[in-house]
Amino acid sequence: MTGAETATASGRAGRANFQTILPDELQLRAHLHPDRPFLCWQNEPYLAYAEVHELVRRLAGGLRSAGVGPGDTVAIMLPNCLELIIAWFAANYLGAVEVPVNVHDRGIFLEHVLSDSGARLIIVHESLTEEVEACAARVPALATIVVVGGAAPRRLSGLTALHYDELAASRSPADPVSHDYRDTMAVLYTSGTSGPAKGVMMSYAHSCVSARPLIDVVELTEADVYFICMPLFHSNAQIIQLLPVLLAGARASIWPGFDAARWWQQVRSVGATVTNTLGVMCQSLFDQPPRDDDGDNPLRVVQTIPAPAAIARQFEERFAVRCVDGYGLTDAAMLSFRQVGDPLVLGSCGRPLDTFELIVADPDTDLPVTAGTVGEILIRPRIPFGFMSGYWRNPEATAKAWRNLWFHTGDAGYLDAAGLLYFHDRLKDVIRVRGENVSSAMIETVVRAHPAVAECAAVAVPSVSGDDDVKVCLVLADGAALTPEDLIEYCRPQMPYFALPSYLEFHASFPVTSTNKIRKVLLRGTTPGVATWDRRAARAARAGQGAAAEATAPVDLAAGSA
């Protein structure tokens, strides 16, 4: 396959050059237009392509001196900052594999990612060093911690502590090592919807299969400014925002997080023309008080996943933008998009891209269902190596995801008579809170370890924000006593803030199947005779406020409080 093939006449992504290597692309951009602006932090001055290239080379040289080489995994646990991007690129320059880590991970969540990835070196923000140190003794491979921010890093038990600035000032900058599009660029951990998080092995070709269609879909050019406020430790910001910017030779403005009240002001301050929203972000922006100048902004396209059907048309009209909906998953790529020039079809994820075969099938038989019938979304790639290489160190999970030569997404949806895709629901036992997918199994592992808990089940319940809230149902050990407040405080240091239960229920026993599995479907609703403890209501009552005000407040995806 060559780079000569272009997008199809319908505008869907064709087999454009999916063999691009990220280090080669940055090096090429730095050579062709060294002074062109590339990255800026918020509305500070831009770093040009040549400047970013030199920063990457120098950090790569520093990491090489710290022992990083081809095939090594490098964990990066940083909030949004330019250092995260430089570190990602530098790891790839050395032929190493980037492992982005959710900055809210802690306890067994963090321990699992670090242990499973086998990373010997982690680059971490100074504010998160204690979280890494707390689990380092149970992660035997981890040997070196590189600290971003602050003064010289303090001595950390059992770890060699280095400072990012020292490595970034290396006098022996590194050029990209020789590797190709089939090699692993990153291991991106899923949310562990049915168990511990799995590491998706993403090749360079796989990353391009996700990134290049976005360029065609939003008609991204070198004149565009991409506004990126979503977490850079997730694939959305990395692979379908920043990577398309690099491939198109455009510019990106990086922000610390999503702030609905200031978002439009921030967009205007940098002249952003394209951005992405996820989960409840779109609704939160729409819920802001209307202004006379809502439509007077530089944005032309907002990639919305999803564009809520109830407000999508009004959102486009009020803010004078196009909402480009889509569907994808970390394990595969973006699988469908609405094109900028296509009419808005409420609820639709657009038309499947031709980079994959996609069918909707009966989840039991894998036989295709008729148009309009809900089934499981099945896919298989058309681009060589343009799909995950497997789950990291988990061949069993890799094999389980495939059956009858189809990859089973675990998502339910349907295709209409016109061939448009609609996402219906999740077949997997997943909880989505504030734009984050949360593993019920991991929550249960933490809660079940409490000595007063005999059994527990974490389930999703509808949230007023549009996503889910976490409800944990418990059966206490004989003779044990436990207050909801005590359990929350027990969980708080052991899980991300967004995984903390919003509701608790204490049951005498659980309904089970004939094979003694808990029937979670019966726990998602109300159970006669069982009272539900509401964490928000309890907190608001303590503060002497009404719970409704807090429950309906705009959601800040960057907030760390809960």
Image: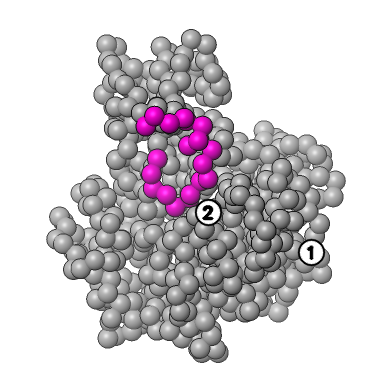
Is 177 left or right of 338, judged from the image as shown? Answer: left
Query: Any magenta on residue 17?
Result: no
The answer to whether any part of residue 285 appears in the image is yes
In this rendering, is residue 71 above or below 188? below
Q: Which of 501 and 523 is in front in this view?
A: 501
Magenta part, dominant SS:
loop
Image quarter in which the C terminus is found: top left
Residue at left 80%, top 60%? Answer: 342
Q: Where is residue 416 in the image (x, y as percent from the top left)?
A: 81, 45
Residue at left 48%, top 72%? Answer: 43
Q: Where is residue 395 in the image (x, y as percent from the top left)?
A: 47, 48
Q: Which amino acid type is shown beneath numbered disc 1?
A: Gly
Residue for badge 1: 341
Q: Which amino acid type is shown beneath numbered disc 2?
A: Ala
Regarding mark 1 in the picture, which secondary structure is present there? loop
Residue at left 40%, top 53%? Answer: 102
Q: Nearer the viewer, residue 43 or 41?
A: 43
Q: How crowded is mark 2: few (under 14 residues within 10 Å), some or many (20 or more)?
A: some
Question: Which mark identifies residue 261?
Answer: 2
In this rendering, is residue 247 above or below 289? below
